[in-house]
């Protein structure tokens, strides 16, 4: 981790997500009523507003939905360029992430390319889910 990077602070609503990441699992929530799977974590279903939701282990697979390549200096990140991406998970939700283990160029970062989750430990409490090209 580079100095200056903002470290997320878990809340009671997001603790399951951060616990999962620390254990090498990408965890999502699913509504017990309508079965909608969603991200980011929240205590109710964004589709039907039901409050009975479950935490599920995601496959960790997805595809590159969209991205930008940042060339500007950013605290806590290695020298640019680096991709800031929207990953569409196999379960349906989309999440922002970085793409690792890949050239940070439009030629390498192809829309719809298959991705898999990988985990970047920031400290003893926080591990970030990131994505890389699927192997």
Image (cartoon, rainbow, N blue to C red):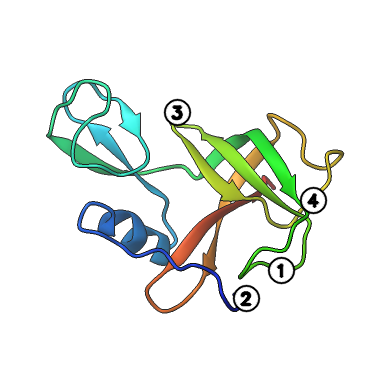
Assess whether mark 2 and mark 1 are in contact (beta carbons under 8 angstroms).
yes
Q: Is residue 135 left or right of residue 95?
A: right
Distance from disc 4 to disc 3, alpha carbons, whole Å, reads 25 Å
Q: Nearer the viewer, mark 1 or mark 4?
A: 1
The residues tagged by marks 1 and 2 sit, at their Cα atoms, a distance apart of 7 Å
Along the horizontal axis of the image, is 84 left or right of 61? right
The quadrant in which residue 48 appears is top left
Mark 1, residue position: 78
Query: Which quarter of the picture shows residue 53?
Result: top left
Residue, disc 2: 2
Answer above or below: position of 20 versus 50. Answer: below
Q: Tell me which numbered mark, 3 or 1, is placed earlier along the sequence.
A: 1
Residue occupying image coordinates x 27% and y 34%: 30
**Which badge, 1 or 4, is on the more N-terminal residue?**
1
Looking at the image, residue 15 sits to the left or right of residue 102; the answer is left
Q: Where is residue 100 in the image (x, y as percent from the top left)?
A: 68, 56
């Amino acid at each position: 981790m580079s100095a200056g990077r903002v470290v997320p602070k878990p809340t009671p609503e997001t603790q399951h997500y951060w616990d999962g990441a620390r254990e090498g699992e990408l965890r999502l929530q699913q509504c017990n009523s309508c079965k909608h799977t969603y991200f980011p974590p929240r205590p109710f279903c964004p589709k039907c507003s039901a409050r009975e939701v479950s935490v599920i282990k995601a496959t960790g697979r997805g595809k590159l939905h969209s991205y930008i390549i940042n060339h500007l200096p950013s605290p806590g990140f290695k020298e640019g360029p680096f991709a800031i991406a929207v990953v569409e998970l196999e379960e349906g939700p989309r999440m922002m992430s970085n793409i690792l283990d890949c050239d940070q160029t439009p030629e390498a970062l192809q829309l719809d390319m298959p991705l898999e989750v990988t985990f970047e430990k920031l400290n003893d409490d926080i591990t970030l889910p990131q994505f890389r090209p699927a192997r």
